[in-house]
């Protein structure tokens, strides 16, 4: 699921309209609509953070950070390390 799809899904699950999210996050309605429809990618961390905060989810969730790790585990592939090795 892409960032825009996840953004749309969470917004609908919470029962929020596009205009409500726009006002809560301080982001133009048109930009949010474009992101949700996949017509524009999100390339600004501050914008993504404001959207996540307004929806009450983490930025990690909206970005799908752990979704990829689950799919790796389901396929039996090694998962990325949680902590990098210590440099001595």
Image: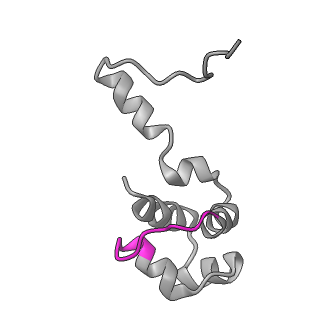
* Residue 10, position as x, y percentages in the image: 52, 60
How did the renderer colour the structure? one colour
The residue furthest top is: 88
Q: Residue at x 35, y 71 (%)?
A: 38
Count of numbered labels shown in the rendering:
0
Give whichever of 74, 40 is nearer the camera: 40
Q: Residue at x 43, y 22 (%)?
A: 79
Q: Residue at x 33, y 19 (%)?
A: 77
Q: Residue at x 68, y 83 (%)?
A: 23
* Residue 28, position as x, y percentages in the image: 58, 86
The residue furthest front is: 88
Quadrant hosting residue 9: bottom left
**Depicted 84 relative to depicted 69: above or below:** above
Give whichever of 52, 13 is nearer the camera: 52
Is 21 within the magenta?
no
Quadrant hosting residue 37: bottom left
From the image, give the main secondary structure of the stretch colored magenta.
loop
Q: Is residue 14 left or right of residue 70?
A: right
* Residue 12, position as x, y percentages in the image: 49, 67
Quadrant hosting residue 44: bottom right
**Depicted 57 relative to depicted 42: above or below:** above
Q: Is residue 52 left or right of residue 72?
A: right
Image quarter in which the C terminus is found: top right
Is 38 within the magenta?
yes
**Depicted 8 relative to depicted 62: above or below:** below
Q: Is residue 21 left or right of residue 8?
A: right
* Residue 49, position as x, y percentages in the image: 66, 62
Q: Which residues are magenta?
A: 35-45
């Amino acid at each position: 699921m892409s960032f825009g799809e996840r953004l749309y899904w969470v917004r609908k699950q919470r029962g929020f309209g596009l205009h409500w999210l726009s006002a809560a996050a301080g982001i133009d309605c048109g930009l949010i609509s474009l992101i949700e429809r996949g017509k524009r990618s999100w390339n600004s961390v501050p914008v993504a953070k404001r959207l996540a905060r307004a929806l009450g989810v983490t930025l990690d969730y909206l970005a799908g950070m752990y979704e990829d790790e689950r799919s790796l585990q389901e396929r039996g592939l090694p998962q990325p390390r949680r902590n990098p090795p210590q440099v001595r």
